[in-house]
Amino acid sequence: MAFKESFLQYLQIEKRYSPHTIRSYQNDLDQFFSYLSENGMPSDPGELTSHHIRAWIVSLMDGGIKPVSVHRKISCLRVFFRYLRKDGAIKGDPLEKVVLPKRKKSLPGFVSEQSLNNLLDGNNFGTDFAGIRNRTIIEMLYLTGMRRAELIGLRIPDVDLQSAQVKVTGKRNKQRIIPLTRPFTVRLDEYLRMKNENASGDSSDWFFITDKGNKLYDKFVYNVVTGYLSMVTTIEKKSPHILRHTFATHMLNRGADLNVIKEFLGHANLSATQIYTHNTFEKLKKIYKQAHPRA
């Protein structure tokens, strides 16, 4: 489908979406058009109506897909059809009369300060290259709030130990500077010394590498983080993104301004950051119930 390929190129070149987001959009579009084909519906975007969209939504819900995932998939279609209208490929909007299922608002999970202190201050990592690197990965995610893809994309020149700061390239290639603590720069220096002994030629410019000296990949980082977090917490989700949530929640709990946290996280607007105020409010409610004599 030429229109789908041109849309994905548009996301990559003009919108500068991350490879992860583009893959997600491609998967959602593939799933949508596969559903249309399997059910004898038109594959030409110009022939699609709200009836076809609603039928897909019902199919997703019947298949056990959660409302939040349905919203994400329909968001993909909105961008897709908006692109086609702008390009003149279609005239109407098949999503105009589509009503989405209500989604339950869930607070982002996070790891407690004590649990992370127990992990980072305990003898959990060892002194070989893999252990030093794994600790550095977890600490980098927690101390900066960067995304997993941003961590994987770090290169040696991005980390300035002398100035104690790291340059992060986020979504749509937007860059931001995040400060580092002096004790952490000492550990980073130790990691780099060991890395130089393990790096191969083509991968040596990447800041983090695998045991074989190659660039990190998504599953590698996921396994490192979930494995170590399982030692100190029983929260259900232990993905690298939890450390980003944890960074924001701990900063807010200790008095950081919401706008400052927004800049650290690389959010485009404040509304994306405000969800962390709910975690803080839940903590306040708990303290109130424990401390107030009439609570």
Image (cartoon, rainbow, N blue to C red):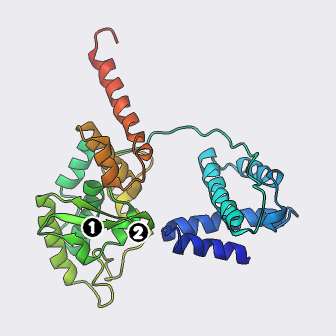
Which corner quadrant holds the N terminus? Answer: bottom right
Query: 38 or 255, which is in the foreground?
Result: 255
Q: Of helix, strand and loop, which one carries label 1?
A: strand
Residue 140 visible: yes
Residue 93 position in % (x across, y down): 75, 55
Residue 29 lies in quadrant: bottom right
Instruction: Give the percent coordinates (x, y) of residue 99.
Output: 72, 42
Residue 173 - label: 2
Q: Is residue 235 above or below residue 265?
A: above
Residue lying at 78% horizontally and 57% vertically, measured from the top left = 92
Looking at the picture, tell me which residue is in the foreground, 237 or 81. 81
| Left or right relative to 222: residue 252 | left
Task: Compare marks 1 and 2 and give the one earlier in the sequence.
Answer: 1
Q: For mark 2, give the secondary structure.
A: helix
Q: Position of residue 232 (x, y in %)?
A: 30, 48
Three-letter code for the amino acid on which mark 2 is drawn:
Asn
The quadrant of the image that shows the C terminus is top left
Tell whether 37 sits left or right of 105. Answer: right
Label 2 packing within 10 angstroms: few (<14), some (14-19), many (20+): few
Determine which of the numbered discs, if any, sits on residue 227 in the image: none
User: Front-most of 54 and 97?
Assistant: 97
In screen coordinates, is 29 left or right of 22?
right
- Residue 266 position, x and y percent, is 36, 56
Residue 178 to residue 234: above or below = below
Residue located at (66% from left, 56% from top): 78
Q: Amino acid at mark 1?
A: Lys
Rendering quarter of residue 288: top left
Q: Which residue: 40% across, 66% down?
A: 149
Please name the residue that numbered disc 1 is placed on. Answer: 167
131 and 20: which one is in front?
20
Q: How many marks?
A: 2
Residue 111, picture quadrant: top left
